[in-house]
Amino acid sequence: QTEEEEIRIGFSQAMLNDEWRQSMNNAMELQASLYPNVTLEISNANYNVQQQIEQLKNFIGDSVDIIIVSPIQSKPITPIVEEAMKAGIPVLVVDRKTDNQKYTAYVGADNIEVGRNAGNIIVSNVQDSLSVVEIRGLAGSSPAEERSLGFHQILDKFPKIKFAGTIEGDWEKESITESLRELLSRTGPVDYIFAHNDRMAMGAWEVARNLAMEGQIKIIGVDGLNGPNGGIQLVKDGVLSATILYPTGGAEAIDIALKILKAEVVPTNNILSTTVIDRFNADIMQNQFTKINEQQGLIESQISAIKRQEQLYYSQNNILKIIITF
Ligand code: FRU
C-alpha cells in the first residue's frame, strides 16, 4: 500500500431521524471506508439551522480538506458556505442547495424533474376535470421549491386540473395531518395528492383512511426507498399509486469530493437519475435494490476482514520488533 496523504472530509447532515438520511450516511461511510487515507466526520445538524452553521464554522476552523453539506434550508446556510470557499475549502452540496452557485459542486437528482414526473402521471390520466392537492416539503429548502415548480410547470397547462389546496409541510408527516384532515373534510375526496416525500404521502394516506376516502384518492410520493417502510413497499401495498425515486447520492458525494481534491475537472451540477416507480415496476426495482444491498453487505464484511488482518499484522510485527531488540 502506497503512502497516500491523509484526507479529512467534514460532512454536515441536515438531520438524521429518517431512513433516507440514514441510508445516505451509510452509503457515504461505506464509500469512504474503501479509501484507507480518508477520514469522514459526519455531524448531524438535527434540523437546527444555527447548529448547522456552527458545524460548518467548526469544519472551517479545523481546516478539513473538503466540506460536504446537505443544507436544511437554502438561505441561512448560503453565507457560511461562501465563507468556507473564501477560506479555500471546497464545498460539495448534496441533495439540498444553497441560494447561489457559490459552491464547488452539487450532487443530487434534479428536483424540478421529480416534480414534473409527478405532474406527468396525473396529466396522463386526465379525462374530465381532476382535483389535486399538493403537500409541500419545508419552505425554503430547495427540493420543496423545485418539486413544486416542476409539478406546476406540467399541471398549470391543463385547465381541467384544479388545485383543491396546497398544504405546507416540513417533510415529516406530523406537519400535515391536521391541515389535510381539515381540507379533505371540507372538499371531500380529491383525485390526486402529490406529497413531496413518502413520509408525508404515508401521512396523507392515514388521514384519507380515517375519513374513509383512501380508496378514492391516488397518492404520489417521492424517495422510493427500499425496505419494509420504504416507498417501494408502499407502492406494492397499494398505499401509494406511485413514488418518484430520489437517490441519496451518498456514494457519489464521496467520489466527487475525492475528485475535487485531486484537482480533477468536476461538473458543477452532478445530476443523479430519477424515475417513476409504480405497480408495474415496483417488484423489479425492489429486487434490484435488494441485490445492491447484499453486495454492499459483502463489501462491508470484506473491509472489516481486511482491517482485522491488518491489526493482526501490526501486532505480530510489534512482537517481532520486541524480540529483535532483545
Ligand atoms: C429526508 C428528506 C427526504 C426528501 C429529502 C429532501 O430527510 O426529507 O424525504 O426527499 O429530505 O431534501
Image: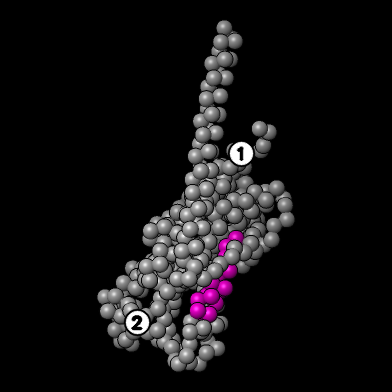
Q: Is residue 40 visible?
A: no
Q: Which residue is mark 2?
A: 216
Please give left or right for residue 82 compared with residue 238 in the image. right
- x, y (%) of residue 78? 57, 63
Start-end of magenta stretch? 107-121
Amino acid at the residue labelled 2: Gln
Q: Is residue 169 magenta?
A: no
- x, y (%) of residue 117? 53, 75
- N-terminal of the pair, mark 2 or mark 1, is 1
For the residue with label 2, is its CB less than 8 Å from the closest atom of ligand 1?
no
Amino acid at the residue labelled 1: Asn
Q: Nearer the viewer, residue 153 or 121?
A: 121
Q: Which residue is mark 1?
A: 37
Of tags 2 and 1, which is closer to the observer? 2
Q: Is residue 121 above or below residue 129?
A: above
Instruction: Identify the residue at image location x=43%, y=88%.
Output: 130
Please give left or right for residue 67 compared with residue 262 in the image. left
- x, y (%) of residue 198? 42, 67
Q: Residues within 10 Å of mark 2 (few under 14, many from 20)?
A: some
Q: CA distance from mark 2 to mark 1?
A: 55 Å
Please give left or right for residue 263 compared with residue 106 in the image. right
**Magenta segment, prevailing SS (helix, strand or loop):** helix
Q: Is residue 298 above or below residue 106?
A: above
